[in-house]
Structures are given as structure tokens and as C-alpha cells.
Image (spheres, rainbow, N blue to C red):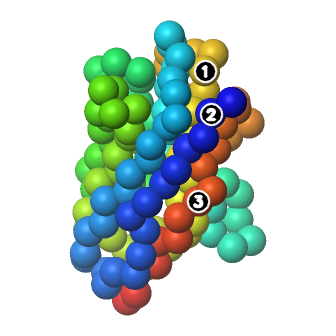
């Protein structure tokens, strides 16, 4: 089993920044980690993903150029730096881990392990 613990959500004004963290209780020989988000009444959408080595990153179209995903493998931790936040970024953000692939996918069903979620609210 793997526990993922997120932190760093909160309330911020439009244009502001937040940094989310996700710590994993363990990792695997090959794995990927990603951030998804889900707004009320909407699907869970891919935000960003990163390879286990941290050498390749992937982003959803709506966050490219504003969000940055990174990892500290020594700490089993992945980060999501969110800049230039917009009200439409408001959602619950989830950290996810897929232990079966080295390339992150955008489909939430591919991920076996999930954090509890952290609320991000961006006011106009």
C-alpha cells in the first residue's frame, strides 16, 4: 500500500500563487506521479505529470506556462507550483501515483493510488 499526503491548498486572489506538495509513503522501481483536479459537477482532469526520474514533465493545456511540476525523489515528494492563478483553477487537487509505467498518462483511471485531495480556491 501507498499513502499519498497532500498539503498547500488554500484561498488566493486571482493572479496569485500557491505551491502544493504530495509526499508518498513509498515508491517503486518505475512509477509516475501526477496532479489532477476536480471542480464541482465536473470530471477529474489531468493537470500535470512527471516521470519518476523527474526528467520529463507533462501539462494540461489550460495550465501550460503557469504551473510547474517537480519532484524530490529523495523525499518521495512531488510539488505543483501554481502561478498566475485564475478563478477557473478553483477545484480540489489530487495527487496520484501509477506504479506500472514510467510515462504519466492523462487518464485518471490509470492511477492506482490517490491522495485525499486539497482545496484550491481562487477569488476574482
Q: Position of residue 29 (x, y in %)?
A: 50, 10
According to the picture, the residue beneath numbered tag 1 turns out to be: 99
Gap between marks 1 and 3 measured at Cα: 19 Å
Q: Secondary structure at mark 3?
A: loop
Gap between marks 1 and 2 measured at Cα: 10 Å
Q: Are marks 1 and 3 in contact (CB under 8 Å)?
A: no
Of the two numbered discs 1 and 2 in the rendering, the one whose residue sits closer to the viewer = 2
Q: Secondary structure at mark 2?
A: loop
Q: Earlier in the sequence, mark 1 or mark 2?
A: 2
Q: Position of residue 18 (x, y in %)?
A: 30, 66
- Say if 6 sits above or below 42 in the image: above
* Label ID, residue 2: 2
According to the picture, the residue beneath numbered tag 3 turns out to be: 117
Question: Is 91 positioned to the left or the right of 17 in the image?
Answer: right
Residue at coordinates 60% horizontally, 21% vertically from top-left? 99
The answer to whether residue 37 of the structure is visible from this angle is no
Q: Earlier in the sequence, mark 1 or mark 3?
A: 1
Mark 2 is surrounded, within 10 Å at the Cα level, by few (under 14), some (14 to 19) or many (20 or more) other residues, namely some
Gap between marks 2 and 3 measured at Cα: 15 Å
Residue at coordinates 38% horizontally, 57% vertically from top-left? 20
Locate the N terminus by quadrant.
Answer: top right
Residue at coordinates 44% horizontally, 43% vertically from top-left? 23
Of the two numbered discs 2 and 3 in the rendering, the one whose residue sits closer to the viewer = 2
Q: Are marks 2 and 3 in contact (CB under 8 Å)?
A: no
- Say if 81 sits above or below 85 in the image: above
Amino acid at each position: 500500500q501507498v499513502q499519498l499526503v497532500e498539503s498547500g491548498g488554500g484561498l488566493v486572489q486571482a493572479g496569485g500563487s500557491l505551491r502544493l506538495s504530495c509526499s508518498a509513503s513509498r515508491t517503486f522501481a518505475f512509477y509516475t506521479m501526477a496532479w489532477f483536479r476536480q471542480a464541482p459537477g465536473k470530471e477529474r482532469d489531468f493537470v500535470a505529470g512527471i516521470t519518476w526520474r523527474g526528467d520529463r514533465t507533462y501539462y494540461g493545456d489550460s495550465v501550460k506556462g503557469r504551473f510547474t511540476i517537480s519532484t524530490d525523489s529523495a523525499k518521495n515528494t512531488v510539488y505543483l507550483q501554481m502561478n498566475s492563478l485564475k478563478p477557473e483553477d478553483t477545484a480540489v487537487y489530487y495527487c496520484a501515483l501509477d506504479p506500472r509505467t514510467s510515462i504519466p498518462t492523462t487518464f485518471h483511471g490509470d492511477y492506482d493510488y490517490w491522495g485525499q485531495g486539497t482545496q484550491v480556491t481562487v477569488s476574482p
